[in-house]
Image (cartoon, rainbow, N blue to C red):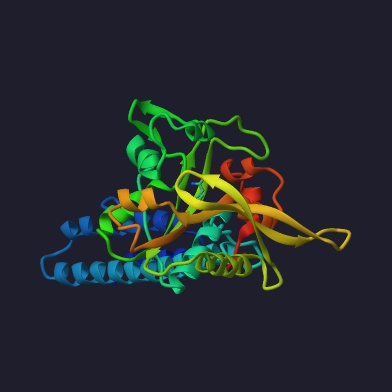
């Protein structure tokens, strides 16, 4: 090998050895191995050599190229590894950082009451029925024994969309719909759902609220069966120490009709009562319109105000909290019933 080639090779390897950055390595590659690099230019010297010397010299230049190329590769890999390790060191995961929070929703308090009572009544052999919120006057009133000119319609002033269609004022039309569907067969259902009445909203009134209707039709149904079902429900909701009080009332679709109060212990230790629902024995006219022979069948029905129950159960001071979707309110009912 010529001295010049030897020198170049030695020089290149030294430079590679002492380099310590990737751009430097690249610079060295260009300096020696690129087309115009000093090693590549050595090939030009072939012309000055005799034909016998040429193969040997050519081979020597190629060997030098290969050696330098290998050294560059090794150095480059080494530097890349160092760079990667540094990167990893800087990007260390800080396990002490607070994690992402996934907020878990909860069941709306009104739905907790509904689901709770569905479970209870399903356990007592009831089915859960449904009906439309946009209802025919026919089902909402007439089938419930409130003819077009019935004065009691005034108790449930409502939103009509046309002469015969309204937002249902109670869940009672589902009584009529279910009776027609069951065509004379015994039935027990509850029906939870939204109802609407014209009312000015304030802490105790809302133009939209929620009811659960109950209806049982069978042979040999007595008022005692109604009291039994209601007492079971009240005790399930509020505790075994509660009693119920029935007061005479009036609904066109039940006869006799009652308002049902639940007992509570007042601050002074005496017993107080709060009204929670309306109920009664199904009126013979309602049974007859529903396709049941009132001489053979009897029934009872009740209508519970779900907000009322939730307000009493959870001590809520304003009915409007149920409808405003404020998470500070709703978040307080996580897992109350489950
Ligand atoms: N539908 C009545 C109301 O909304 C409640 C009720 C239902 C009363 C069933 C008696 C029987 O006021």
Q: Residue furthest front?
A: 295
Residue 203, above or below 247 = above
Residue 9, above or below 197 = below
Q: 301 left or right of 57?
A: right
| Residue 279 position within the rendered picture, expressed as x and y whole percent measured from the top left | 53, 54
Pick the quarter of the image with the C terminus: bottom right
| Residue 72 position within the rendered picture, expressed as x and y whole percent measured from the top left | 38, 66
Q: Nearer the viewer, residue 250 or 244?
A: 250
**Rendering quarter of residue 108:** bottom right
Q: Nearer the viewer, residue 111 or 89?
A: 111
**Rendering quarter of residue 93:** bottom right
Which residue: 55% across, 45% down?
250
**Rendering quarter of residue 337:** bottom right
| Residue 274 position within the rendered picture, expressed as x and y whole percent measured from the top left | 70, 53
Q: Nearer the viewer, residue 66 or 111?
A: 111
Q: Nearer the viewer, residue 202 or 77?
A: 202
Q: Residue furthest right?
A: 268
Q: Residue furthest left?
A: 51
| Residue 134 position within the rendered picture, expressed as x and y whole percent measured from the top left | 36, 38
Figure disc tally: 0
Q: 159 left or right of 333?
A: left
Which residue: 41% across, 70% down?
220
């Amino acid at each position: 090998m010529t001295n010049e080639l030897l020198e170049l090779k030695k020089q290149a390897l030294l430079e590679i050895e002492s380099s310590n950055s990737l751009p430097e390595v690249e610079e060295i590659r260009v300096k020696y191995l690129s087309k115009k690099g000093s090693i590549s230019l050595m090939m030009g010297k072939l012309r000055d050599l005799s034909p016998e010397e040429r193969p040997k010299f050519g081979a020597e230049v190629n060997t030098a190229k290969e050696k330098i190329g290998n050294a560059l590769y090794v150095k480059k890999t080494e530097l890349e590894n160092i760079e990667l390790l540094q990167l990893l060191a800087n990007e260390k995961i800080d396990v002490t950082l607070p994690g992402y929070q996934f907020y878990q929703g909860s069941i709306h308090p009104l739905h907790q009451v509904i689901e709770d009572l569905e479970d209870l009544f399903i356990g007592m052999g009831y089915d859960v029925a449904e009906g439309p919120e946009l209802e025919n006057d026919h089902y909402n009133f007439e089938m419930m024994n409130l003819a077009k000119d019935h004065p009691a319609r005034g108790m449930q002033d409502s939103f009509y969309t046309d002469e015969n269609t309204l937002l249902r004022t109670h869940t009672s039309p589902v009584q009529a719909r279910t009776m027609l569907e069951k065509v004379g067969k015994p039935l027990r259902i509850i029906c939870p759902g939204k109802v609407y009445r014209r009312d000015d909203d304030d802490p105790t009134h809302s133009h939209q609220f929620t009811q659960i209707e109950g209806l049982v039709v069978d042979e040999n149904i007595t008022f005692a069966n109604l009291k039994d079902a209601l007492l079971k429900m009240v005790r399930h909701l509020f505790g075994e120490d509660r009693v119920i009080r029935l007061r005479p009332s009036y609904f066109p679709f039940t006869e006799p009709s009652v308002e049902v109060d639940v007992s509570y212990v007042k601050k002074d230790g005496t017993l107080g009562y709060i009204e929670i629902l309306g109920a009664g024995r199904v009126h013979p006219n309602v049974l007859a319109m529903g396709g049941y022979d009132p001489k053979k069948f009897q029934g009872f029905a009740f209508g519970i105000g779900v907000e009322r129950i939730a307000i009493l159960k959870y001590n809520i001071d304003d009915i409007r909290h149920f409808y405003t979707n404020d998470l500070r309110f709703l978040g307080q009912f996580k897992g109350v019933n489950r």
